[in-house]
Structures are given as structure tokens and as C-alpha cells.
Amino acid sequence: MPHSVSPVGIVRSCFKEKFAIPRQPHLAPAARGVLELLPPFDSGDAVQGLEEVSHVWLLFLFHQALEDKPRLKVRPPRLGGNRSLGVFATRSTHRPNGIGQSVVKLDKVEANRLWLSGIDLLDGTPVLDIKPYVPYVDRQDGATNRIAEAAPEPIPVEWVEGALVLAREHALRLDEPLVELIEQCLAQDPRPAYQQPEPGRRYGARLWDLDVRWHYPRPGLIRVLEISPSD
Ligand code: SAM
């Protein structure tokens, strides 16, 4: 039974491109954004009571990964891209109907917008529904998942002095925890697990209105090289 859905809001996020977004929420608590509600949900009525809730489930569209033909098998990057699994055994972005779900922290409720942190959502992500996290139901004490048993071990992140000075200045300008955001995202090691980084190879991602560049001076260590305004 085909059924059409339409967004209740759009996320304005610190993540302006897919690369370097953490693979799940909460891995970067400093990742913040605002969910701007669309009419008729922006009058205040639809969010009444939500100020009593610390976290929400967001159901959203992977709008930059939509595909016409559903995949049955996927190769999650976190597993090195060499293990093929049934799509329903993964949290891959490539999935039937393109629907994602994340539990995120709700920092502030306004009539027409929700302030969020710990997000793993690209800027412009359409949100299809918002539901309160209910701890006594949603937390499953005995739950196991042998494919994804624990959060990946974070890798150390160091800075070139000039880049750190600039990051602190931009943090003040943006009024955002930018240094923490960069460190938390890069500590997840955004590069696909199968890529062996050469020390000379530079990687980059866009966070807020900034381009962040880094390299791997040796395996298992990231050094932030440069922060510059995005074009
Ligand atoms: N927590 C969600 C879930 O389990 O459904 C998302 C998990 S998915 C593995 C997380 C990745 O989705 C991020 O690293 C980012 O690259 C990607 N992503 C986030 N928002 C997206 C969007 N709107 N369109 C396409 N990809 C997106």
C-alpha cells in the first residue's frame, strides 16, 4: 500500500556534508542543530509538553541517499566495507524508503523550533516525525548486537597550534563548542576503514561555515592542520 509522507520540519545542522558526520547520534555530543518546524506544526500546539522531555526520537529521510531500486545487501563502512549484510541487519543509509532514526538530546523547545545536540544529521534533513524518548520503554537492559557490540575506540586528535587558535576564535564567533565538535567527530575516524591513509594525504570536511583539514601523521593519530572559511 503506497502512502505518501511529508516532512514536519527541516534540520539546520553543523554538518554541511556527509563526510565526517558521526555514524550514530551521541558520538559527538557537541554536534548541534535546530529542527525548524513547518506549518501547521510551527504554532506551538504540536510541541506542547515536550519541554518535559530530555531526548526525542527523530524519524527522518536520508534525503541525500535516496535510491530507486532497493538494496537487499549492504557493506557497512564501519565494518571495513568487506562484510556484506542484509540491509535490515544494519543502520545503513541505503535502505527501502530511505528512513533514518536517531535519539537526540533536546536542549530547548520553542514554538517553531527544537534545539538539538548529539545529532548525526546532515544540514537540510527532512524530519518525518518526532517522538519523546521514554526511558522505561526504550532502554532495553538485556539488549545485545554481536555485529555492533561497542562504540568504536576513539583515536587521538592533536592540533597544529595555529589551527587551534583559529578554532577557538571561530567558536566564540559562532557561539558553538567548535573545538569539541571537531575533536569528537575526528576521533571517530571518518575515513572508510579500508583506506590506508598516507601521511601526505589531506582530508577535509565542512562544519558550520568552516572547512576543516586534517591528516594522519601515523596510523591511529589525527592532526588538525587548518581551519578556513568555506567558499
Ligand atoms: N542514526 C541513524 C539511523 O540509525 O538510522 C543514522 C545512521 S547512518 C549510518 C549515519 C550517517 O548518515 C551519517 O554518518 C551521515 O553520513 C549520513 N546522513 C545523515 N543525514 C543524512 C541525510 N539527510 N542524507 C543522507 N545521509 C545522511
Image (cartoon, grey):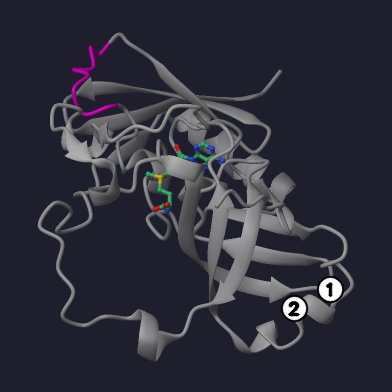
**What's under tag 1, amino acid-wise?**
Ala
The answer to whether one can see residue 57 in this image is yes
Numbered range of the magenta stretch: 192-199
Single out the residue that lies furthest toward the front.
1
Secondary structure character of the magenta stretch overall: loop
Q: Which element is circle 2 on?
A: helix
User: Which circle marks residue 111 in the picture?
Assistant: 1
Determine crowd level at label 1: few under 14, some 14-19, many 20+ residues with C-alpha closer than 10 A: some
Residue position marked by numbered label 2 in the rendering: 47
* For residue 114, above or below residue 210: below
Left or right, residue 62 beside residue 169: left
- The residues tagged by marks 2 and 1 sit, at their Cα atoms, a distance apart of 7 Å
Name the image quarter holding the C terminus: top right
- Circles 2 and 1, Cβ within 8 Å, touching? The answer is yes
Indicate the position of residue 220 as horizontal and vertical percent values.
Answer: 18, 33
Q: Nearer the viewer, residue 204 or 179?
A: 204
Q: Kindly tell me whether mark 2's CB lies below 8 Å from ligand 1.
A: no
Indicate the position of residue 23 as horizontal and vertical percent values.
Answer: 37, 45
* For residue 69, above or below residue 129: above
**What's under tag 2, amino acid-wise?**
Val
Indicate the position of residue 167 as horizontal and vertical percent values.
Answer: 57, 38
